[in-house]
Amino acid sequence: IAHIDEYRNWRSNFPAIKKATPVIGMQGTMVILFGDNFGTTGLGIPGSVLVGTTKLVTVEWNDRKIVAIIPVPPPSDGELYVKKNFKWSGKNYSANSNYMKFKQFDWAKADAVDIDRFLDMLKEQYVSTK
């Protein structure tokens, strides 16, 4: 039983994304992640936000919310996730959160309907962050 409790305590360090908005974007798009166990910034940013292997630029980070910006050049379609670094029993570990699909928005390939949806999504995000 002690091993099970130790495993649960270790596992409680893993980050979990509950919501990400938006899940489609282009360079400069602000992505907001809500969840649990992201870690605190007392000793610097405790990890990174990635789409595939591309790191996003982190502008805000706390245990339940992360704000990041899609970099230049932007990532292609991929999995959006949080990679958190932590210490456990004196050793360094890294843990990935659950994954969410992220789609690169391409103005050149978008039709009017796609553009309207994308702009509505950005407007909704802007209003929800006020």
Image (cartoon, grey):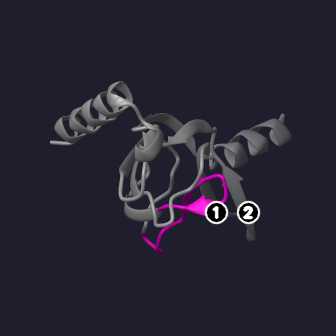
Amino acid type, mark 2: Tyr
Q: CA distance from mark 2 to mark 1?
A: 5 Å
Residue 76 pos. (x, y %): 59, 51
* Pointer 1 local density, CA inside 10 Å: few below 14, some 14–19, many at least 20: some
Between 124 and 2, which is closer to the camera in this rendering? 124
Residue 113 pos. (x, y %): 34, 24
The answer to whether residue 105 is seen in the rendering is: no
Q: Quadrant of the N terminus?
A: top right
The dot on residue 23 is: none
Identify the residue shown where x is 75% and y is 64%: 89
Between 126 and 14, which is closer to the camera in this rendering? 126
Residue 46 falls within the magenta-colored stretch: yes
Between 108 and 20, which is closer to the camera in this rendering? 108
Residue highlighted by disc 1: 86
Mark 2 vs 1: CB contact within 8 A: yes
Secondary element under disc 2, as helix, strand or loop, is: strand
Secondary element under disc 1, as helix, strand or loop, is: strand
Q: Counting residues from the N terminus, which is met first, the one under dot 2 or under dot 1?
A: 1
Between 30 and 83, which is closer to the camera in this rendering? 30
Residue 50 falls within the magenta-colored stretch: yes
Identify the residue shown where x is 58% and y is 36%: 100
Q: Quadrant of the C terminus?
A: top left
Identify the residue shown where x is 42% and y is 63%: 58
Q: Is residue 8 left or right of residue 116?
A: right
Q: Is residue 93 left or right of residue 68?
A: right
The answer to whether residue 1 is seen in the rendering is: yes
Amino acid type, mark 1: Phe
* Pointer 2 local density, CA inside 10 Å: few below 14, some 14–19, many at least 20: few
The dot on residue 93 is: 2
Query: Which region shows up in magenta?
Result: 42-56
> Which quadrant would residue 55 be assigned to in this image?
bottom right
Which residue extends farthest bottom? 43
